[in-house]
Image (cartoon, rainbow, N blue to C red):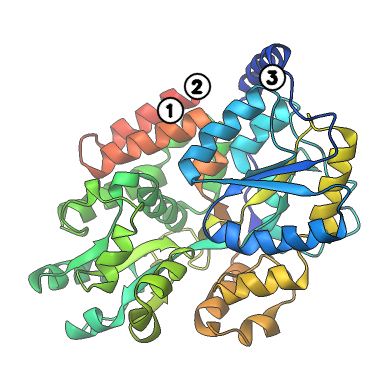
Amino acid sequence: MLRTSPVRTRNRVAGIVLTAALAASVAACSSPGTSSTDVTLWGISSDQEEILDPSLTDWNDANTDAPIEATYFEGEAYKTKIRTAIGAGAAPTLIYNKGGGVLESYVDAGKVVDLSEAFADSPDRFLPFALDPVTVDGALYAVPMKAVAPVVMYYNKDVLSSVGLTPPATWDELLDAVPVLNKAGIAPFALAGGSKWPELMWQEYLVDRIGGPEVFDAILAGEEDAWSHPAVLEANTMIQDLVDAGGFADGFASVTTDSSADAALLYTGKAAMLLQGTWVNSTFRSQAPEFAENSLGYATFPAVDGGAGDVANIVGNPTSYFSVSADASAEQQEQAIAYLKDGLWDEGFVDRLITANQVPPLAGIETTIAESDDADFSGLVYQLISDAPNFQMSWDQALAPAEAQALLTNLDRLFTLTITPEEFSEAMSESATQ
């Protein structure tokens, strides 16, 4: 049975402060369009837009009296836009989010609708882990709207073969591969350290492999000294050992994901492996289709000898979500919920996700996945998410926003060797109490 990690339940004081701040904002700036029947939706551009828009077109054609108007933003721009809009009581009717700590802050402030009753008749449609990050105190506040995105180990088959290596199954094998690859003039791992969050994938997996999911559960629950758990200290020491050994491509601290520079290092043969989310598979297929077809391999994160964590555990983003704004009119809320129930997850939407080499978080689609064009990759991902004893949501999404930002800042310092593992834990313990 899949064990899912709980949504953050601490920092209620922060939620109360946010509620007061939002209330002041609403008083100063009323929500525009709340008297209208038009439903608005904000989302992320690129693949979401391409896959979601046909669903909205079909829905609008059938519901001309209450159409849904979509606006898309780039990822970082969206974070600022939505925070400002929610604070001003001017949020779109359908709010894109990734669940976790950010969504809980919306719940604490009374800014999103409880969807438990609306979706009470369809609890088994989604795989269980997909609803955990959006369930707060037993109530459902969002529903999936995108593919599942665990983190996997990509590798260049040709590069590894050229030096007589196979994908590492254990951490010791991973360390042994580093000098072999460096001697051949190949970076063992590509890493977009300039974006910070890709570094987190290493920490998440190592902490889980060493100490099991209970370690982050304690952090999420705000337990005293949780950031100083021996598994955190050991994982961070292992990360710095890997940096010291030359495990990452030169200049990794300035590489970003904006131009898919980390993926390019892999498909050009300059790096042997890359730890990244499943969304990068589409990057390989669009930017380097021949490489993706013939030379791209994927594996799970290695085991750590003596670790308490199950090697089948995975980390990443269970999926992305839509919530319904509590500031919308009753009619807008009704139409938005109707779309989420009856319009979003239709056959066409599911087909478009699978055609784009993405795996929906739906139960019972094994046959559909097996018949897809990218069955090897999609089949691996579906097996991973179906068999995982625990699917840990990305820490920067699970934690409250302020602590998540502190995490990325201190993690960057850890990877660049400007703080020690002990100093990392001290800094994070301090951020958790603020």
Q: Locate residue 287: give its quadrant.
A: bottom left
Q: Is residue 167 depicted above or below 52 in this figure? A: below
Q: Check contact, mark 2 vs mark 1: CB within 8 A.
A: yes
Which disc is residue 128 wearing? none
- The residue sitting at 71% across, 17% down in the picture is 26
Quadrant including the N terminus: bottom right
Amino acid type shown at disc 2: Thr
What residue is disc 3 on? 19
First in sequence: mark 2 vs mark 3: 3
Give whichever of 201, 47 is nearer the camera: 47
Residue shown at the point (67%, 65%) measured from the top left: 361
Which mark is nearer the camera, 3 or 1?
3
Q: Looking at the image, do the residues carrying marks 2 and 3 touch, with CB atoms under 8 Å apart?
A: no
Category of crowding for the residue at label 2, using alpha-carbon neighbours closer than 10 angstroms: few (below 14), some (14–19), many (at least 20): few
Amino acid of disc 1: Ser
Question: Marks 2/1: CA distance?
Answer: 7 Å
Question: Is residue 216 found left or right of 95 in the rendered image?
Answer: left
**Residue 90: image x %, image y %?**
69, 27
Q: Taking 433 as reference, is 122 left or right?
A: right
Dot 3 falls on a residue whose secondary structure is helix
Of callouts 3 and 1, the N-terminal one: 3
Report crowding for label 3: few under 14, some 14 to 19, many 20 or more residues within 10 A (C-alpha).
many
Q: Is residue 9 above or below residue 204?
A: above
Which residue is disc 2 drawn over? 433
Reading the image, the residue beneath label 1 is 429
Helix, strand or loop for disc 1: helix
User: Within 10 Å of the Cα at label 1, are there few (<14), some (14-19), or many (20+) other Cα atoms?
Assistant: many
Residue type, numbered disc 3: Thr
